[in-house]
Image: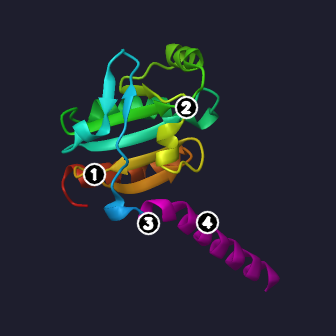
């Protein structure tokens, strides 16, 4: 009986933690994704509001983050599988030293857009709870989901959510 009570309490605790992590997003007016303009790896700038009408997978990462290293091959695959006029991946690096990010990218090249935010201003706007964290943004610029961490087992559900948005089902 005590084991069942502990399991139940753990589940309640996880539910409360999830709710606390989602509160900043749920509390924002109509879940509008905070806009940003950041420099990219190829010397241009990216502005989120310029991507309205497209589905965006926004990923926050750093060179020291092990799960981030695991996510890059998957994001490259995801980028290849989807129409670039309908779907964009933006990976925002939060290293204070851009050279570390570029070294990471020389070992794990990104085929999607990488932007740099060394001061973490964008991460603050998104109330980033941990690394990596990704946000799925619909065609109207609303955050429809947030995912903390990276596990290969989670990618199927993320891909399903992306396809639903691309097909207009969400």
Rounded to the nearest whole Å, what is the CA distance between mark 1 and mark 4?
25 Å
Query: The C terminus is located in which quarter?
Result: bottom left
Eyeballing the image, is 23 above or below 88?
A: below
Q: Position of residue 88 (x, y in %)?
A: 29, 36
Residue occupied by mark 1: 138
Numbered disc 2: secondary structure: loop
Rounded to the nearest whole Å, what is the CA distance between mark 3 and mark 2?
24 Å
**Badge 1: residue crowd in 10 Å (few <14, some 14–19, many ≥20):** many
Numbered disc 4: secondary structure: helix
Q: Position of residue 151 (x, y in %)?
A: 55, 45
Rounded to the nearest whole Å, what is the CA distance between mark 4 and mark 3?
16 Å
Rounded to the nearest whole Å, what is the CA distance between mark 2 and mark 4?
27 Å
Q: Nearer the viewer, mark 1 or mark 3?
A: 3
Query: Farthest bottom residue?
Result: 1
Please state the extent of the stretch shown in magenta in the rendering.
1-27
Q: Residue at 54% across / 44% down in the picture? A: 150
- Tell me the colour scheme of the image: rainbow
Examine the rendering and report whether any part of residue 71 can be seen.
Answer: yes
Eyeballing the image, is 9 above or below 95?
A: below
Q: Nearer the viewer, mark 2 or mark 1?
A: 2
Residue occupied by mark 4: 17
Residue occupied by mark 3: 27
Q: Earlier in the sequence, mark 1 or mark 3?
A: 3
Q: Are marks 4 and 3 in contact (CB under 8 Å)?
A: no
Q: Earlier in the sequence, mark 4 or mark 3?
A: 4
Q: Is residue 26 magenta?
A: yes
Q: Are marks 1 and 3 in contact (CB under 8 Å)?
A: no
Question: Which quadrant holds residue 164?
Answer: bottom left
Dominant secondary structure of the residues highlighted in magenta in the image:
helix
Residue occupied by mark 2: 119
**Badge 4: residue crowd in 10 Å (few <14, some 14–19, many ≥20):** few
**Badge 2: residue crowd in 10 Å (few <14, some 14–19, many ≥20):** few
């Amino acid at each position: 009986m005590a084991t069942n009570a502990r399991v139940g309490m753990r589940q309640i605790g996880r539910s409360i933690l999830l709710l606390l992590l989602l509160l900043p997003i749920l509390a924002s007016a109509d879940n509008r994704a905070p806009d940003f303009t950041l420099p990219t790896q190829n010397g241009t700038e990216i502005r989120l509001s310029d991507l309205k009408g497209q589905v965006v997978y926004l990923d926050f990462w750093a060179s020291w983050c092990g799960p981030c290293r695991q996510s890059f091959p998957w994001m490259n695959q995801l980028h290849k599988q989807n129409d670039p006029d309908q779907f964009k991946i933006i990976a925002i690096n939060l290293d204070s030293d851009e050279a570390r990010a570029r070294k990471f990218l020389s070992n794990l090249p990104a085929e999607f857009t990488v932007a740099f935010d060394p001061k973490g201003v964008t991460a603050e706007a998104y109330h980033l709870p941990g690394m990596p964290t990704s946000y799925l943004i619909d065609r109207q610029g609303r955050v429809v989901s947030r995912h903390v961490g990276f596990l290969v087992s989670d990618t199927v559900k993320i891909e399903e959510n992306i396809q639903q948005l691309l097909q207009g089902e969400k």
